[in-house]
Amino acid sequence: VLTSDLGGGKTTFVKGLAKGLGSLDIATSPTFTINRTYACRDNLVLEHFDFYRLNDPGIVAHELSEVIDQKDTIIAIEWGDIVGDVLPTQRIEIAINRRKDDENKRELIATYPAEYGYVFEESK
Ligand SMILES: Nc1ncnc2c1ncn2[C@@H]1O[C@H](COP(=O)(O)OP(=O)(O)O)[C@@H](O)[C@H]1O
Ligand SMILES: [Mg+2]
């Protein structure tokens, strides 16, 4: 779950994630299509949701429920606050903050349960 202000860098982060996972698909902002699916390496799938302007939690919950328990699927969500209670309690939250000293830099703060620590090990 990615949080930042508008233009903070959530979609940009997901583009990097897709690239890092070996996807050859071009990641565009899915704002008006709710979600996009990226085929990645090792049969991994990246599902990118953007719930901006979507104010019907029922639709959102339905879309998410279709993929949330799928094997080998990574789900990246922008504007996930609308679905608060549908998201698993065990999840990674990444807050993206602008830096005052450089408009092209961001500070990321990740919050995650211990079992997901391995995801961050290489970047330590
Ligand atoms: N270090 C950075 N990380 C992410 N985005 C950056 C960075 N530096 C500049 N940007 C720019 O900030 C904008 C972020 O937009 P976007 O990723 O669509 O934000 P959001 O999805 O949060 O609304 C893009 O124009 C991107 O090029
Ligand atoms: Mg976005």
Image: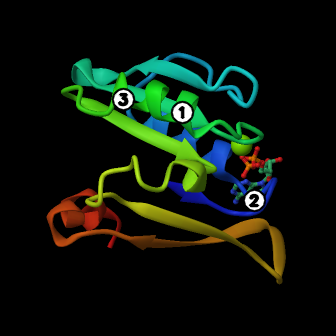
Q: Earlier in the sequence, mark 1 or mark 3?
A: 1
Q: Nearer the viewer, mark 2 or mark 1?
A: 1
Residue drawn at the location 72% of the way across and 68% of the way down = 105
Q: Is residue 96 left or right of residue 91?
A: right
Q: Is residue 56 left or right of residue 111?
A: right
Residue drawn at the location 42% of the way across and 54% of the way down = 85
Q: Mark 3 packing: few (<14 Cα in 10 Å), some, or many (20+)?
A: few
Q: Quadrant of residue 40?
A: top left
Residues 93 and 25: in front is 93
**Percent x, y of residue 8:** 75, 59
**Percent x, y of residue 83:** 51, 48
Residue drawn at the location 48% of the way across and 19% of the way down = 37
Residue drawn at the location 47% of the way across and 42% of the way down = 76
Rendered image: mark on residue 8: 2
- Secondary element under disc 1, as helix, strand or loop, is helix
Color scheme of the displayed model: rainbow
Q: Is mark 2 within 8 Å of ligand 1?
A: yes
Tell me if label 2 and label 1 are in contact, CB under 8 Å. Answer: no
Q: Which residue is the site of mark 1? A: 58
Q: Which residue is the site of mark 3? A: 65
Q: Is residue 94 left or right of residue 22?
A: right
Quadrant housing the C terminus = bottom left
Instruction: Name the kind of residue labelled 3 in the image.
Output: Ser
**Percent x, y of residue 22:** 40, 27
CA separation in Å, label 3 and label 2? 27 Å
Q: Nearer the viewer, mark 1 or mark 3?
A: 1
Q: Quadrant of residue 9?
A: bottom right
Q: Nearer the viewer, mark 3 or mark 2?
A: 3
